[in-house]
Image (tube, grey):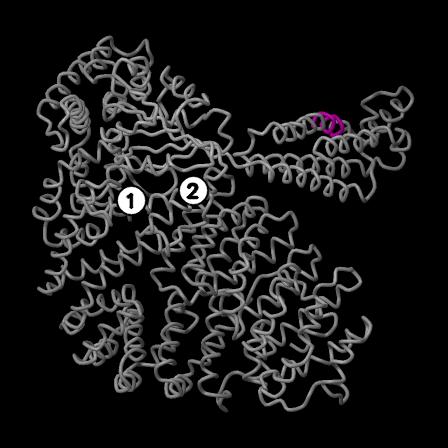
Amino acid sequence: MDALQVVSSVTQIISSMIVAVGALELAYRNLDEAPKRIQSLEDFVCDLENLTRRAKQKHVYKLHNSQLDHQLQSLNTLIERLHPKIGKARRIMSRSKIKNLAQVVWTSMTGDPLGKLVHSIKDDLNWCLESQILTQNVERVIEITAQEIPTRLKVKGEQGYPISSKCLFVRNLLEQESSQHVILIVGLSGIGKSCLARQVASDPPARFVGGAVELGFGQWCSRAACNGSKVEYEKRLARKISKFLVQIGFWKKINNDNSGDLEYLCFMLQKALYGKSTLILLDDVWGQDIVERFAKLYDNDCKYLVTTRNESVYEITEAEKVELSKDEIKEISKAILLYHCRLSGEEIPDVADCLLERCGHHPLTVAVMGKALRKELRAEKWEKAMTNLSNYATCAEGPSSYVNEKQAENTLTIFGSFEFSLEAIPEDSRQLFIALAALSWAEPVPEACVEATWSVLGQKSLFPLIVCKLVEGSLLMKADTDPLYEVHDMVSLYLDSKINDSAEILLNESKAEETASICPWLLIFGKENIKEVAKRKIELSFSVLDEKQVIISLEAILEALMASKSISELETSRASFSSILGPRIADLISTDSQSLTAMSAEAITNIFSKGDYCRYFPSLETTGAVDKLAGLLQNCDDPIIQINIFTVLSKLAEFGSPETDDKVLQSIRFDQLAELLSHNAQEWHECMFAILMSLIKAGKSKAVERMFAFEIEKNLIKLLENGSEVVQHHAIVTLKAFYEMAGPPPANSSLRPANLRLLPWQVRLRLETFVLSDRSVLLSPKPQTFEDVIHRVLDGGNKQVLEAMQDLIPFLEKADDPRIREMILKGPLIERLSELLQHVHPEQNSLRSGSSFLLTKLACAGGEPCIKKYLEYYIIPLLFKMMQCGVAELQDSAYTALHQMLFSNGGSLVLNKIFQMGLIERMVQSLESKTKKTREVNMHCVVDIVELGNKACLERMLSLQAVEKLVKLEKTSGGSGETLTEFLKGMDKCKHLSIAERKLMKQQVVRKVRAALKGHKFETKILAALDGLKSSSSSGSGKYRKTKLKKNCSSSGYLLNA
């Protein structure tokens, strides 16, 4: 059934309702019920409207297809027909009952159409269900149509740049079959090549069914910028191509293993564009080989629109050359000026034509001058601007790389416009702009870095006012969603001439403390020559050991780390800082300054990796760091300092010698550790769990004994009862480590079967082994052998199999016994359970549910050997398939089984299998399922994987747009923010992330949420929920997980035994 047939069915149902019942019958039987029926009809129409809106948003890049567009228009037509009928019915029912009855009787005799409309309100209880099914059918048809339509990529056009005759000329070339595959747009710098190309690509000819995509290169990706190094040049080019493969959807994320192999990436490029018809805009190309690499790709109908100001690229023979000259941009320069100066054609002074001529009609120069003269009506101001532009252009220092006289003259004019714009803005903004020359603008720069640069020059609170002047003057460009700044390539070229001035301002003229605060930022985001200077200054401050300067440097280092845009960037920056900090850490810890020692401890906590601990901690052992840090704890009441010092001491114990381990256990104050685990110290709980785990690894049973003595176990159990979901998770992991190291809980343990039964069932499944490990009697109601039960499972009918499954539970709970586990693994049980999972008849649903529960119990008790057996019989994909089946009880039981397997001893094998089979992609796609239960179980499974995965796993999840899909769920479910907070809680629980990495990843998630919610009615509500997560992450009602799982197995008694 196509969409039009579905819409026709909707119309027929409504029409049949209108004529089905006589008016008199409705008056007697349904008058009181009519308002409810009207409300049902209104709800149905609302569903159709939401469906239409969702479909348009989801398939915005596919609306060029006439069939899909027609289906959506049909829905709109239906909605427009329904609205006035419902309005009429509502007005009729708003009258008094007497008038209403009289009207009904009258219309029943006269046949008034309005009365017949009231009759149509009557329906039966199945109407609501039919409406929902009908809505789903319509949406399914639209989805099927949309899946068959290729995505059409889009390029955003330049605001304020009108369509010119040259745009139409280039578009005409692209439409010609006989034209070359490469079209070169050449011209002077700032003449509008990129703007022209984007205007064409923003509305590409229809022949490009894949749409258009832009890939920018810039001078950064040139041999000259790499000082002639072929290796570095190919590395940068490979990085650009990797991003392009992600941009067009061929890769989900950048593959770090091959991201530097240029030849491999070109092979992938050939594969990605095979059979495609896409317009590819290669912007600001500096090397002829870049164009040739794209042009030699075969078996595709792509064309390449190339902009360049490098004359060597002009020499490409097999290309259409389109030169953009001064005469051709004259027709649009006036429109550009009017747009930027915010004046109409009647308001602008006559002298504006002379100014345009002096600007050479170059769009960039015109735009800069227009913004500098915004809302200016006085002709004398325009004349002065023209004079100043000439003077600045005469005095401006052009780039030495330009030998072409015409190019140099053009560049000087543009630089002159920059000088004029700078003169028109406040002095503080001008100083900031010059200082920004020290930064590398090859890629966008984080706002925090720009703000740190300003903090050297002025009061930090004024930064928003200062930087906005640069944005208004076109000297800086701010990203729409992320807090990033970038500049036009000509602005970057201008800033290159100001590097010495910038270095003088930031590194020589500033105070020592200000220099200390900016150097870490310059080491990460500065130009190459500036990076070297910044590194030497940081090393010098560490060697001199000036307390104030070192503390400021360390604080700035931590801030700069958190401004990283990705985990890989964070890792690179972390390695740079650790190489500087590591060799000096013993000296910093050993100083007499308690503030410096405390700050050094915080830096170690956030910067050092496992390798750094092994490399640099021996020097701490020999310089008495343990005594120094432990002594500082004696009189310290600041929990932040306590946490950082405890972290360093626990790492010293973990990575140090046995002597150091003993010394730490003797010196550390376990009473303070217990206090930091109290309910009142919620914000420190996450760090405390990591500290306890390090001490347990290092001190083993000795550490655990001391923790028992100071009632740390008791505090952990209190957190199980009263803590939030995240805290409960970490408390469980820590308690398991306690009992695995120390054996069964001692006599003074707080964990007893009585309070174990009060805990959530997921907690019981993880801890019952330690409390009930002495059980020796099977729970079966009658004596029977394992072989007897297996025989009934293999050969019995449905009822006998279900009974046998119940009798199997006591055996499976003892699968941690090697003898029983071996008997299970060598027998046919797991294969039989795998077969039962594959049954599809509804009457066998209870068997499938019971099978998944038995697999759950076996995984919990049997661990990795059982998981390996599961993998042989494809149980993981079978459970995943069950999660998508649409039967709520089966979906619940399948998710519960996967959840327990993931968190069992062999969970890493399950996680690897999920990724190897591509199940994670399907899981994320299921977040957009039409079935609520399917969305729910897949969302929980995604959170489990986030919790258990590593950095690569989390980056994969983000690249699959899991966050954006969760935002869509929030938009359609009331905007509570619950699904997004669950996702962030999963990150909080992830043990494979450092504190810095976790913080950065959460920042990325929040940025994605902000971008996806921008302008939506739930934006404030959802962001408030995410902001509130930090304060509530360590407190809660004691619920382990706020799921709505029905725990379907309880009806057969399965969970009673759990």
Task: Give, as a three-letter code, the residue at label 1.
Answer: Glu
Magenta stretch? 83-90
Q: Of residues 690 and 271, which is closer to you in this image?
A: 271
Q: Secondary structure at mark 1?
A: helix
Q: Quadrant of the C terminus?
A: bottom right
Q: Main secondary structure of the magenta part?
A: helix
Q: Quadrant of the N terminus?
A: top right
Instruction: Decide: is 313 above or below 335.
Output: below
Q: Of residues 622 and 275, which is closer to you in this image?
A: 275
Question: For mark 1, does the 10 Å Cα neighbourhood hold few (<14), some (14 to 19), or many (20 or more) residues?
Answer: some
Query: Residue at left 11%, top 56%?
Result: 537
Q: Which residue is mark 2?
A: 270
Task: Give, as a three-letter code, the residue at label 2.
Answer: Gln
- Tell me which numbered mark, 1 or 2, is placed earlier along the sequence: 2
Q: Gap in Å between the C-alphas at discs 1 and 2?
A: 37 Å
Percent of width and height locating residue 763: 56, 73
Percent of width and height locating residue 525: 23, 48
Q: Which residue is mark 1?
A: 447
Q: Secondary structure at mark 2?
A: helix
